[in-house]
Image: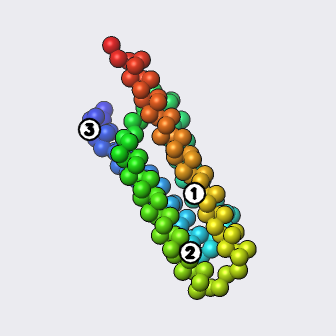
């Protein structure tokens, strides 16, 4: 028989490791796209991790009958961080374009790829946050005595 504290600690370690993998995929995507100019085929693994992680988390929480409450302040700070990353990418992109003398078609291709990729990941994240907060409230009402 396993002590509940050990099981909880083990689950916490696994959860933290998944977040490390998630952010490693995000950093890998940024480096591959911005520095090396990789296209969608070379970023497919990162895309799958960034999109499937919140979907998997939602499905598993439904299966286990739990809800994850996502604090509005945490959500706001994560979007501020996301926009800061976008600003850094734009500044780096302008530098890269000027230093490599890319033509307009190449610039539009890279920009449209980045915008589409980031929009997909952000949309999944926003839908996850809204769904989980609504589900948290519904479960609270259901089990509130």
From the viewer's side, name the closer residue of 99 and 54.
Answer: 99
Q: Does residue 79 appear to the left or right of 101 in the view shown?
A: left
- Number of residues whose C-alpha sits closer than 10 Å to that of mark 2, classed few (under 14), some (14–19) or many (20 or more): some
| Badge number at residue 93 | 2
Instruction: Say whether disc 3 or disc 2 marks the residue closer to the N-terminus.
Output: 3
Q: Residue at x 27, y 35 (%)?
A: 3
Above or below, comparing residue 35 to residue 17 in the picture:
below
- Number of residues whose C-alpha sits closer than 10 Å to that of mark 1, classed few (under 14), some (14–19) or many (20 or more): some
- Number of residues whose C-alpha sits closer than 10 Å to that of mark 3, classed few (under 14), some (14–19) or many (20 or more): few
Q: What residue does disc 1 label?
A: 118
Which secondary structure, mark 3?
helix
| Badge number at residue 5 | 3
Which secondary structure, mark 2?
helix
Residue 11: percent from left, percent from top: 36, 43
Residue 83: percent from left, percent from top: 47, 59
Comparing labels 3 and 2, the label whose residue is closer to the camera: 2
Instruction: Say whether disc 1 or disc 2 marks the residue closer to the N-terminus.
Output: 2
């Amino acid at each position: 028989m396993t002590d509940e504290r050990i099981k909880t600690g083990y689950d916490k370690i696994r959860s933290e490791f998944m977040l490390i993998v998630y952010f490693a995929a995000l950093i890998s995507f940024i480096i591959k796209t911005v520095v090396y100019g990789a296209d969608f085929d070379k970023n497919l693994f990162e895309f799958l991790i960034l999109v499937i992680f919140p979907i998997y988390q939602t499905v598993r929480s439904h299966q286990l009958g739990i809800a994850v409450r996502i604090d509005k302040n945490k959500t706001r700070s994560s979007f501020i961080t996301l926009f800061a990353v976008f600003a850094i990418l734009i500044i780096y992109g302008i530098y890269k374009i000027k230093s490599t003398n890319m033509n307009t078609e190449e610039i539009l291709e890279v920009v449209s790829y980045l915008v589409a990729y980031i929009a997909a990941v952000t949309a999944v994240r926003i839908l996850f946050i809204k769904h989980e907060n609504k589900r948290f409230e519904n479960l609270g009402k259901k089990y509130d005595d």
